Amino acid sequence: MGRPLGSHANAEGDAKTDIGAIEHQGMRILGLISRMGRELDPDEIKRAHPEVSELDVTRPNGERLRVLQLPAMVDGQRLQAELIAHLVNSTTPVPSLLVRATKLRHGEDAERHLIDGAVLVFHASGVYALQLRSIPTRTIDEPTTERAIFGPKDSFVEPLEMNIALIRSHLRDPQLIAQRVTLGTDVPTETAVLYKEGSADPMQLEEILSRLRRYRPPRIGFVSSLLRAVYGGLWSPFLPADFTERPYRAADFLFRGRFALLVDGSPYALLLPVTFAELFMDEEEYLQSTSARYFVRAIRFIAFVIALLGPGLYIAVLTVNTTVMPGLLAIAVSSNRQSLAFPILTETLLMLFVLDIMAEATTAMKGVLGPAISIVGSLIVGQAAVRANLASNLGVILLALTALATYITPRYVLTYAVRVWKYIFLLVSGVLGLVGWSAGLIWLMINLSVKREIGSPYLAPLAPFLPSAWSTASPQQRRSTSVPFYVRRTAPRRR
Amino acid sequence: MKRSPALAPWSIAGVSFIVTICMTPVALGRPVFQAAGYGTLLWMLLAFGWSFLGTHLSLSLNDAALNPWADTVRKGLRFLRVPFYLMAAAAMLHAWVDLLAYTELPATPRLMVALVTAGLAFYAIRLGIENVTRVIGLIAIVSIVPLTILVLGAMPDASLRWLLPFPFGTGSIPWLWPTILFCPRGYDILPVFGPLAKGDLRRPVFTGVALGAGYLVITMVEPQLVFGLTSASQLPSPFLAVVETITSTYLPFQRIAFVSTIIWQMIVFSIVTSYSIAGIASLGVRVHPLTPLRVLVPWLAVVVGLAVVVLPEDVFAVIKNTWSLYGIILYFLLPALLLGFGRRRATREAALA
């Protein structure tokens, strides 16, 4: 008697297929669902979609079976070895041979299984769907958006199973759980919530799962859809989550009692909850001495403050509170600005806007065009604008400093926050001077202190101020397997 | 998931710190220097100790086992606190608007300053007492370093010879004593914020009050050390004048005093917010989050209205002194009496048992 079919795990790794073609094929079939009847008729399926191929199999006892498949989505070798060979060579009754297959009842089920990479076996005893999906993937490359100098250099790929396996390779812990949730009302997509049992906060897990289950979009795009699912409509540019394409980083995060969310087809993991202070930290820092680590963090934080508050302060001092400048500097500034066409506020707003346009253009045009755009932009802003009396030299220096300081943060999500808030500071400072600037600062502090996503205060352990939590910044504590108490829903707790 | 507010003890310590510092170095500087003489130092040291006693009394009042009447009296005091907090918030905002309008930022209209502060306070209070405490705790942390820089920055100009000779208690005017004693008033928010703390308050709050009171003593002493008593008492804001003496050839700013403007705006926001929330809580209104706007809006309207009215300096001083006396009675004498009676009764009951 042959062994049960479908008992092998899915093939990993090297099956390189055109992902785009498969997605296109899948979408076309999805369109058929509405046209398909509820009958399990192979001819109806074939008529509706010509790409479906059929194999006629004759068994040793003379039984004839029809096998339908989407060739690009099925692993041909497995189909041959695990289905056809057994059907042709074995006399075991088909239901016994297909114990791992799913017996279907409706046409819609057949469509879904077909799209998902199953083969449909039409037999007198019923219709069976046997999962033989080939996982189309690319090779595991180095991360493109995150730095990995000394740490592991692998990065996520598209298939969910592969990504879970990659995380498991970095965190070989039986307590690592991957809980599956299927999202998408029209196009069901597999997602996974990963956590380390015993370390993660059960209340936070419950909250995440319930929010995911309540989320009912037609389809799930990238992992960013999950961000929306968990946090809803986020207006604040300070995201209480982070994205990573490094399995090692996700594993480290999970080790510390947090959550990683993955979507099938997305090469990024959504990490949550994240505190503000953690956005200035980088795993690679721990290869340096303690003093060097704190120095680097201080540099990053100061750069963040400069990028966020610098333009506003510049406007406040040069427009409203001019008396705080030393006399010589005031003379130098005013002589530099004598022939300029715009007032300081307009000039700074325009230049920062140009900077953001350049940043977006460079992001959109990666590769060869990116540096070219940067050069053109810097030429226009740095030289032509000054020569045309549209900008002052001091303004250009401010612009350069702001640009450098904005992109020094190790986490890209934080740069958007800086880019949005600097305009707010600029406007309130231009109108009210230092009063407006400090009012903006208070407003920001209120906004950040209030943020409490899935129970974790975003600014903890600073607000609420929890001195006992500062020790978690030390390497020994940071490697602790339990989530810091201030990240839990119930924070702050009694010591 | 609804839950009751849980305030982190160290955030409450931040509120105590800010409330202790308050605006006193700026707002009370000249009257105190004019009236109190060299004895100011002694009074400030006395006030320093007094603030610890006040803190101890406020914290002990929360101990219902120690004081069986605490709850009854707390309810009775609730309505007395409302005018106190209203007066406090308005006085602080008024002092600050005066300061900014006449000395620091002549380009900024008084009404605008008051409205911005009240708007921020409105926004914060609407988010509830827990969030307000967090924000003020954060402001306390953010303020400590600049305040230290301001105090230390003027030290090179200080001279101990201004303190000599050291006549004890000369020049003091009795009606100013309550004001000086009530300067470090970080404990008067504890009846509202304290019961919501999740954890032991003693160490955090004593630390906050000690830091604030210490800073206050320094800011009272420093003008004497830099200018001498006679000159300091002639200045409109002695401590601010001290800050304005700080110069640095290494920074692109002529006057580092502009930092004080930013810090004091944060402090005033914290004061107005914490006193407003305490006053509203005294009315029995739920402040997590604050639901009835009909309480908050009139409250802040009164505060802003009082802030933009230009009061004669002596009238303003009388208001502040009355307020200090009122505060001492409400937050020091009454709790002390209450605690005394409670302890006596407990001892008597123990003896009878």
Image (cartoon, grey):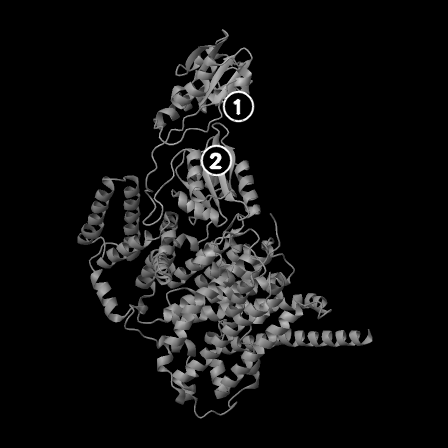
Q: Which mark is residue A110?
A: none
- Counting residues from the start of the chain, the first of labels 1 and 2 encountered is 1
Query: What chain does badge 2 belong to?
Result: A
Q: Chain of mark 1?
A: A
CA–CA distance between discs 1 and 2? 23 Å
Q: In the orientation shown, which residue stands out farthest toward the top? A: A62
* x, y percent for residue B162: 41, 88
Question: Pointer 2: what residue?
Answer: A191
Residue A54 image point, x, y percent: 42, 13
B84 and A189: which one is in front? A189
Residue that carries the numbered disc 1 in the rendered image = A100
Q: Are marks 1 and 2 on the same chain?
A: yes
Asked if marks 1 and 2 touch (Cβ < 8 Å), the reply is: no
Q: Quadrant of residue A161?
A: top left
Which callout, 1 or 2, points to the residue nearer the camera? 1
Q: In this figure, what is the number of numbered marks?
A: 2
Secondary structure of residue under mark 2:
strand
The type of residue carrying mark 2 is: Thr
Quadrant of the image containing the C terminus of chain B: bottom right
The image position of residue A292, as x and y in percent, is: 34, 61
Q: Nearer the viewer, residue B124 or B69?
A: B69
For the question of whether residue A201 can be seen, the reply is yes
Vertical placement of residue A311 versus B14, above or below: above
Q: Which residue is more in the foreground, B110 or A203?
A: A203
Horizontal relation, residue A475 to residue B284: left or right = left
**Amino acid identity at mark 1:** Arg
